[in-house]
Image: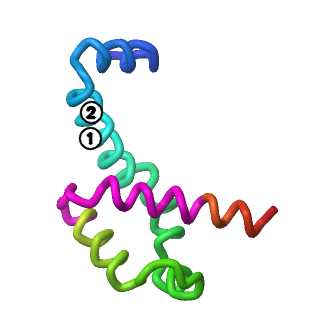
Amino acid sequence: MSSPAPWEIVLGAYRQGAFQCQRKFGVLLADGLRGDLRSWAEDLLDARRITNEGFFDASLVRARWDGFIAGNDADRHLLWAILMFESWLSRQRAG
């Protein structure tokens, strides 16, 4: 069975309402961060890196990440926001 096209996912989410769309994104996000995106996230959430940058408390970020990897999805959106910030910061410093 092939995966649906991106437009089919968006259209299906639109038809099911905003709550369903947010819920699906959360599931896709959680699956991705535990799967294909895990090594990318691990690099960005490295405790030494977080400590050296000084924007976040590395022990709290790692505790949330470890809990997420163990199956607690409550912090997935917070972790995604931190990952987006860290990714942006990395690009700013490289460029």
> Residue tagged by mark 2?
24
Q: Quadrant of the N terminus?
A: top left
Residue 55 position, x and y percent, is: 52, 78
Q: How many marks?
A: 2
Q: Quadrant of residue 8?
A: top left
| Of residues 93 and 33, the one drawn nearer to the viewer in this rendering | 93
Q: Which mark is residue 27?
A: 1
| Of residues 69 and 80, the one drawn nearer to the viewer in this rendering | 80
| Of residues 4 and 15, the one drawn nearer to the viewer in this rendering | 15
Q: Quadrant of residue 52?
A: bottom right
Residue drawn at x 45%, y 20% is 6
Determine the secondary structure under disc 2: helix
Residue 65 position, x and y percent, is: 32, 69
User: Disc 1 and disc 2: Cα gap in Å?
Assistant: 5 Å
Q: Quadrant of the C terminus?
A: bottom right
Determine the secondary structure under disc 1: helix
Q: Which residues are magenta?
A: 69-87
Q: Residue furthest right?
A: 95
Indicate whether 89 appears above or below 24: below
Indicate whether 3 appears above or below 32: above
> How many other residues sit within 10 Å of disc 1, few (<14), some (14-19) or many (≥20)?
some
Residue 83 position, x and y percent, is: 48, 60
Residue drawn at x 46%, y 68% is 42
Which residue type carries mark 1? Val
> How many other residues sit within 10 Å of disc 2, few (<14), some (14-19) or many (≥20)?
some
User: Residue 28 vs residue 73: left or right?
Assistant: right
**Circles 1 and 2: CB atoms closer than 8 Å:** yes
Which residue type carries mark 2? Lys
Residue drawn at x 38%, y 46% is 32
Indicate whether 18 appears above or below 84: above
Q: Which mark is residue 84?
A: none
